Amino acid sequence: MTETKTDKFTLINELARRRGFFWQAYEIYGGAGGFVTYGPLGAKLKQNIERKLRELFVNKLGILEIESSVITPGKVFEASGHVGHFKEPMVECAKCGKRFRADHLLEEYAKISAAEAEKMSLTEIKQAIEKNAITCPDCGGTFNEPQQFLTMFETTIGPYSGATGYGRPEAAQGIFVEFNRLYTIARERLPFGVLQIGHALRNEISPRQGLIRLREFTIADLEFFFDPETPNCHLLKDVENETLPILTAEKRLKGSDEILNITVKEALKQKLISSEWQAFFMAMAKKLLIEIGVPAEKQRFIEKLPWEKAHYSTQSFDQEVLVDRWGWIEVSGHAYRTDYDLKCHMEASGVDLRVYKEYETPIEEEQFVVKPIMAKLGPVFKAEAAKVAQLLASVPAEEVAAALEKHGYYQIQNYKILREHVNVSRQKTVVRGKRFIPHVVEPSFGCDRLFYVALEYAYHTKDDRVILSFPRDLAPTQIGVYPLVSKDDIVEKAEEVHRLLVNEGFSAEFDDTGSIGRRYARADEAGIPLGVTIDYDTLNDDTVTVRDRDSWQQVRVSIKDLPELLHKYFSGKINFEELGTLVQAK
C-alpha cells in the first residue's frame, strides 16, 4: 500500500467505518451532516479518553465532577452573553439555497486567515467575496447578502412557545449556575475546581471536517475558582520546568508563526501567561496529549488575538495539534474568564454568588451604605419592589453610590434606581471580612477531537499491514485470545483463558475465525496491544504465547502468572519483554 500525506484522513475514515470506530449517523436516510455514531471500538476508545481526563483532573487533583442537563432555559444563555455573541457569518447561495460559513469560504478560496476573517464586518465579508469571485462550491451560484447566524439550537420547554430553551453549546454554564451549592460541597474553601464531561450542541452552518467539526459533540469543561487576591498556584512546582510551545499574539500580529519554547516558570515571569493556574492547566493539557499518543513537537499553544477571544475571556490560548489533512487544529481552549460568568448570573438572577473571606485582623474603615426606601420603591416598582431591594443588596454599595453620583441613577437588570429611591451614607464600621466574586480559569477539551488525533497518531503501516499503535491504557480492547487451531481441546482451553482474563477485569476479545495470521492482522488494525495464543504446548505445560502488537515479538508466559503480569503491564510497571521468555515468532 502506498500512503500519501493527503489521503491519510480518507484511509482512517474507511478503517473507522469498517472496523466500527465511527461513521456518519443516520446513513439509511442519507446521513445527517455534523452527527456521528460511535461503534463498539469507538465507544470504548472515547470512554478511555474521558477516563484519562477524569484520572488526571478528578482522581489526581481532587476536582469535583457534576452532570447537568443539555437543554437549558433561555434566560441562562441570555445572562451569559451567548445569545448576543454566539453567532457566525453566513452566506446563502441564491441558486441552490445551500448555506456556508463565510469565514471558511474566505479562508479556503481567498487565503484570508481565520484570524483576519473573524474581525471583518458583514460588509467587508461581502466585498471580499465579490473581490475574490467566490461562488457556491456546490453549484457555482452567487451568494446573497451575508448575515449573522445564531449557532445554538433553539427549542421550547414544555407546551408554551414563550418558554425558550437552548441546547447548551458548552458545559460551563451548568457549573456556574450551581456555584453556591458546589461551593458548599467544597467546604466553602477556595481554590476548587469543577469538571463536567457531556454532550453539547452547536448548529454549525456547514460542518465538513468529520470529527473535527460536529453539531453534537462531547465537551469537557473544567472551571477552576480562586481568589484573585491570592492567585498563586500551589501545584506550580510540579510543572514549572515543563516547556510550553507558544505562538504569542505579538508574533501573530507581526505575521510570524515562530514558536517560542519556554518553561512555565519563565512564561509567567515574562507575563506571557497572566494566571499561574492557567499556566498549570496548559502544562497538564500538554501532558494529556502526550499520554494519548501526540508527541510534544506536534503540539503548540496559540494565543488568541483580541478580536478572536470569546466575550467572557481576558486571555485565551488554543492548544493545537498538527494533523495530516487539516494542519493545526484546536483540541483544547484555555481561557481566563475572570469573574465574568458569576457576575452576569448574579445580576440576572438576583442571587448572591459572592463568597465571604474573613480578615486575619478586623479593620476599621469608612464604607458606603445603601438602604432602599421601600415607601419610594413601592409606588414605582409595585409587586417587584422587594425583588429590586434584594438585587440592590447583592451588589457592592460603592458601585451603586458611584453610579448615582456620576449618572444620577443605577441600572440593575431592567430596573432604573434613582437617587430618591435609596438612602446613601458613609459610616465607619469594623470590617471583619468581605464578600467577593471568585475568578475562573477554564481548560476546555473537545473529546471528539481528542478521539480523532489519538486515532491519527496511532495509525501507521508495517509490511503493508495497518496497525493502530494506541498507548496500552487507551486501546479499546486490551487483549485478543486465540486458539491456534480449531480443535476442541485447544478451543476449550482458549475459552477458559478468555474467561480468566475477563474475570480479572481485562477487556479481552475471543477470536477463532480464520488463520492465526489473519486474526493477528485484524487485532493490529483494531489496536489490540497483546495477543494470547493457546497452542499444543499449552496443553502440555499450561503456558501461552503472548504477542506484541507493535514489534510482533512473542514471549512465553505461564497461565497462572498471566493475570498478575498483565495487570503490571497495563499499569505501565513493566514492559513487554518482562512479561516472559522471548521466543521465536511462529
Image (spheres, helix red, strand yellow):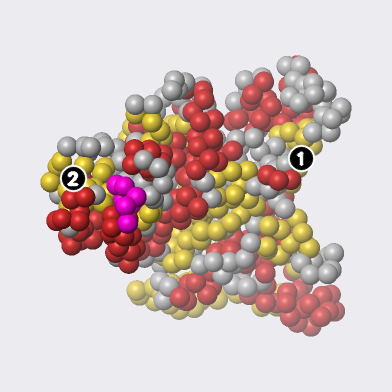
When the figure is inspected, residue 289 is found, relative to residue 257, above or below; the finding is below
**Residue found 59% across the figure and 43% down from its top:** 23
Of residues 147 and 288, the one nearer the viewer is 288
Give percent across and percent down for residue 207.
66, 38
**Residue found 55% across the figure and 50% down from its top:** 38
Identify residue type, mark 2: Val
Identify residue type, mark 1: Gln
When the figure is inspected, residue 31 is found, relative to residue 544, above or below; the finding is above
**Residue found 55% across the figure and 58% down from its top:** 198
Q: Is residue 155 left or right of residue 195?
A: right
Of residues 271 and 213, the one nearer the viewer is 213
Q: Is residue 115 left or right of residue 502?
A: right
In the rendered image, the quadrant that contains the C terminus is top left
Magenta residue span: 478-488
- Where disc 2 sits, the SS reads strand
Magenta stretch contains residue 186: no
Give percent across and percent down for residue 563.
23, 61
- Where disc 1 sits, the SS reads strand
Q: Is residue 169 left or right of residue 502?
A: right
Identity of the residue furthest to the bottom in this view: 375
Label 2 sits on residue = 555
Q: Residues within 10 Å of mark 1 (few under 14, many from 20)?
A: some
Label 1 sits on residue = 148
**Residue found 24% across the figure and 49% down from its top:** 535
Q: Residues within 10 Å of mark 2 (few under 14, many from 20)?
A: many
